[in-house]
Image: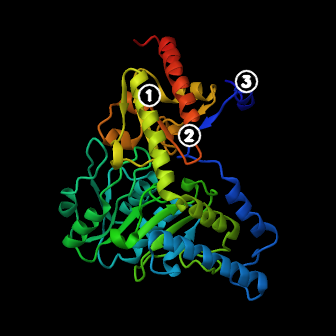
Amino acid sequence: MESVKDLIKAHESIKKEVYLDIENSSFVPKEVVNAMVPYFIEKAYGNPTITHKPGWMAYETIMQASDKIANFIGASSVEEINFTPSETVSNNLAIIGTALANKDKGNKIVVSEIEPLSIVFASEILEKYGFKVSKIPVDTEGFVDLEKIPENVDEETVLVSIMRVNNEIGTIEPIKQAVELAKEKNPNVLFHSDASDAYGKIDLDVQNLGVDMVTLSSNKILGPRGVGVLYVKEGVKVEKLLEGQIGTQRLWPGVENTPLIMGFAKASELAFRNFDDNISHMKELRDKLISGILGEVSDTVLNGPSGDDRAPDNVNISILRCEGEALTIELSLNGVYVSSGSACTRLLLQPSHVLTKIGREFEEAHGSILMKVTRYHKQNDIEHVLKVIPKAVKRLREISSIK
């Protein structure tokens, strides 16, 4: 087996690179890095709970970042913004923490079939402790079946969790209607939505949607890894999952990572600056990528909806008679970086649960590639990708001798 060094060396002749694997990790723009650097070495480097100047500066800095993010999502106050180490942590807090804090009101959780694995696995943990988990089915484009919500929500239901935008196939879920249906059936039910792939990409107003909790992720908007947010509406009870040194964050103990929090705030600021122009640009690149692949490569299927029902950055296509993991390697050797399936499942050699739930066959799911564009990508980047992909698919199909 080739070593990683050999694989990296095989890329030395590449003249142009296009990185589209934003789902799994991303570059961080210089503006974001520059915004973080002072907080490592000269500004607000103290513990925000300590009573001295560096501590007070850290506290004020974190409050300013909280206020900025609160304004971007329409939250009522900075107290509703809880910084965490990641989207995964925020989702676990929302599912497990809410269930434990409200177990006197019921023992049932309702989620969609295509939630991220951090929600799926957190729900399964609760089943071990006597909670019941009900899953709402989706159609072939990934939209939740709204009629099933009243059928699954009952007086024992404490929480419903449906993501705002599906991270794999880009489906923009009808969350406002889902919230209304759930609360009509049980006015006491709480509603959480993982909005990591919505934040900075579509309008996201927590009060308009009617949600009680929302998950956000820094790295999904080109911010630093290692920081996320759980918005919790005032009055909603969530139990901490860990104990430790008391900080400014009531749901996550320990000393706050001020530089990363400032990076998240700066990334948010950039994502919402020239918002309409950025979204229009991403949609144009997204549609060019989709139409180019479907038009030039035979036996291809778009996963998820098209047009305005799809996230502006998301492209997920199944390429039949071509194994997805092999295609990511072939594309990488030609300077195009994508992923096959979701980051959470690819090392397990299992098809994406999202793709199987929307009706894709085993071969279709395994032959999928996921790409996401950003405001930084240009037309010539997409043109390069559209030159590379058909050649890569043709070569792999010839090698496999699958006609």
**Mark 2 and mark 3 residues within 8 Å of each other at the beta carbon:** no
Sequence-wise, which precedes: disc 1 or disc 2?
2
Question: What is the crowding at mark 2: few (fewer than 14 residues within 10 Å), some, or many (at least 20)?
Answer: many
Q: Is residue 88 left or right of residue 142?
A: right
Q: Could you say which disc has been placed on residue 293 in the image?
A: 1
Quadrant holding the N terminus:
top right
Q: Is residue 107 left or right of residue 42?
A: left
Quadrant holding the C terminus:
top left
Identify the residue position indicated by label 2 in the image.
Answer: 20
Position of 91 relative to 354 (above/below): below
Q: Quadrant of residue 108?
A: bottom left
Question: What is the crowding at mark 3: few (fewer than 14 residues within 10 Å), some, or many (at least 20)?
Answer: few
Which residue shows up at 46% across the image and 69% down it?
A: 73
Amino acid marked by disc 1: Ile
Sequence-wise, which precedes: disc 2 or disc 3?
3
Q: Is residue 258 left or right of residue 192?
A: right
Q: Could you say which disc has been placed on residue 272 in the image?
A: none
